[in-house]
Amino acid sequence: MKKQNISEKMFRRTFRGAASVLTLACAAAMFGTGCSKKQAETTAAVETEAAKAEDTKAETDNVSKDETLITVESGEIKVSGANSKAVSISGTTVTITDAGTYRLSGELPEGQISVEAGDKDDVRLVLDNFSITNSETAPINVVTSGNFFIELAEGSENTVEDKREAAKDSGKDTSDAPDAAIYSKSDLYITGSGSLTVKGGYCDGIHGKDALVISDDVKLDITAAEHGINGKDSLEIQDGSITITSGEDGLHSKGDVIISDGTMEIHAEDDGIHAETALIIDGGTVDVAESYEGLEGLSVTINGGTVSVRASDDGVNSAGGSDETDDIFAVTEGAAITINGGNVYVAAAGDGLDSNGNVVVNGGEIYIDGPEIGANASLDYNGTGTITGGTFALTGASGMLQSFSEDSTQIQLVVYYTEQQAAGTRITVSDSEGNVIYENAESTQAFEAFLLSSPELKQGETYTVKTGDQEETVTIDGNIATIGERAGGMMGGFRGRGMRGQQENGEQGEMGTPPEGMPEMNAADGQNGAPEGMTGGFGQGGPGGQGGPGGKGGPGGHGGNPPADMGGTPPDMNGAFGQTGAGETLPETSAAAG
């Protein structure tokens, strides 16, 4: 509970008491000898003032006596309260120079809140129905402070708008500029239970040069020319409801990005979430509705929550620094995609899971939808791929597909089709007694291969896989069971990764015609480029035997730009994969519990 001024509290109580006494006295007099007109007027006046005092109390109950009030009324900035001397006004610029809590309300067009306190002075801004815009610089700019807090007052609606011309359009150097609507050189904490709309027209929506932490029941709606939320050293989302539309990354950090709870919806022109080091999702609902690459970090770890990704290139990418390297098969130290739990859905036009190191699946419910283009794969890794638990299913192109490595402890079932299957073709996997252990009819892309790994798959058991009106049976003998054969000219299978032709600087490949059954290519005659509308892929390697590497192809062809979207809402799911935070459902399955 907020502290109250004791003298004010006593004054209000005394005032109300006086009103009651006068009213009773007047009533008694009227009952006996009558109350004079003057007495009645006095009583009414006292009661009116008491009511006003009650209204004032209601308005100020949430204001601590230790706060400084900064209010804007009809364009006039007023300062009152505990630490008024720490606030100076110059035109529409408010400068704060000392530690403390400062509550802001009103509308301040073409204004700025500048924090220039000591480097050990913690400063808290409470936004309480406050709106600010600026066409020349960052509306909120923290030059120096200790910890810096933005608290959104309960039930309040606030707006911070950077109206500068987009830096990437103007060609301006932003290295030394406050390049966001909310810019802080100090550790930045966003808390509270109100809402905040941020419009970052210049560069970022929110940029913290040190750590940036978002918690409590905050509601953020951010649009930005570049990154939506940028925590340079680290970015942590502990809770809240966040919607981002960004010209570059939705969430970005040169350090770690950690998400422990909350609900996120991200529409990004580049990465949905980008971390230079570790990207960790422990819980919450993360919906990357639009992106070039969905989740990217040196390491990407999903421990829980509901994660949905749509990407016009890779869905989940583990890579160190730049994605470009002279050796496309080199293992990057520390690179890994690890899934220990949660419900994960990825729809990608490029690789579904793409690791420059390892892929490890220990638990969770995972479905990879696509790609349908043969130059990419639903599962792609340079190190090892192991699965020890969880339910993992994918549909996609067969040419570059990798299954999990032979040291995996959980059984895999792989189906290669002689013809490409249409998006939405139903797949049902049943055991010998007719029990359905997996079902999915909600793929959004055509596919040539299907992979399932589940605790329900048992050694020695016979399974029936029905795809559309096709039906095949297989008996499990070993860690992998295969139905059908990969088309000729593709990379090797279970034991090792077949070689891919290398794409370098967009040069055309030197391979011949694509393997039979592959989509028509658009590279130069005799080249093995990517289908029109997609980024350049890799030339196909030589034929690889079961468990053996294929031959190395030439440089891959260069295609066009990736498609802008992956087809709208995510596929419906029931059973194992559960619901998304937005109420949409993920692909329908009926995988058995466990």
Image: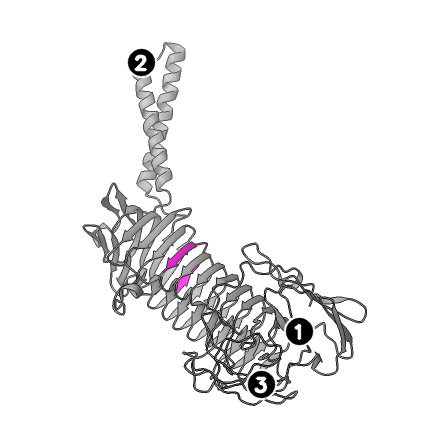
User: Which marked residue is nearer to the observer: mark 1 or mark 3?
Assistant: 1
- Residue at the disc numbered 3: 497
Q: CA distance from mark 1 to mark 3?
A: 23 Å
First in sequence: mark 2 or mark 3? 2
Q: Amino acid at mark 2?
A: Lys
**x, y (%) of residue 568?**
53, 59
- Residue at the disc numbered 2: 37
**x, y (%) of residue 194?**
41, 50
**x, y (%) of residue 388?**
64, 77
Q: Nearer the viewer, residue 370 or 162?
A: 370
The answer to whether marks 1 and 2 mark residues whose Cβ atoms lie closer than 8 Å is no
Residue furthest to the top in view is 33
Q: CA distance from mark 2 to mark 3?
A: 100 Å
Secondary-structure class at tag 3: loop
First in sequence: mark 1 or mark 2? 2
Looking at the image, can residue 454 be seen?
Answer: yes
User: Which marked residue is nearer to the observer: mark 1 or mark 2?
Assistant: 1
Q: Is residue 250 magenta?
A: no
- Residue at the disc numbered 1: 419
Q: CA distance from mark 1 to mark 2?
A: 99 Å
Q: Amino acid at mark 1?
A: Glu
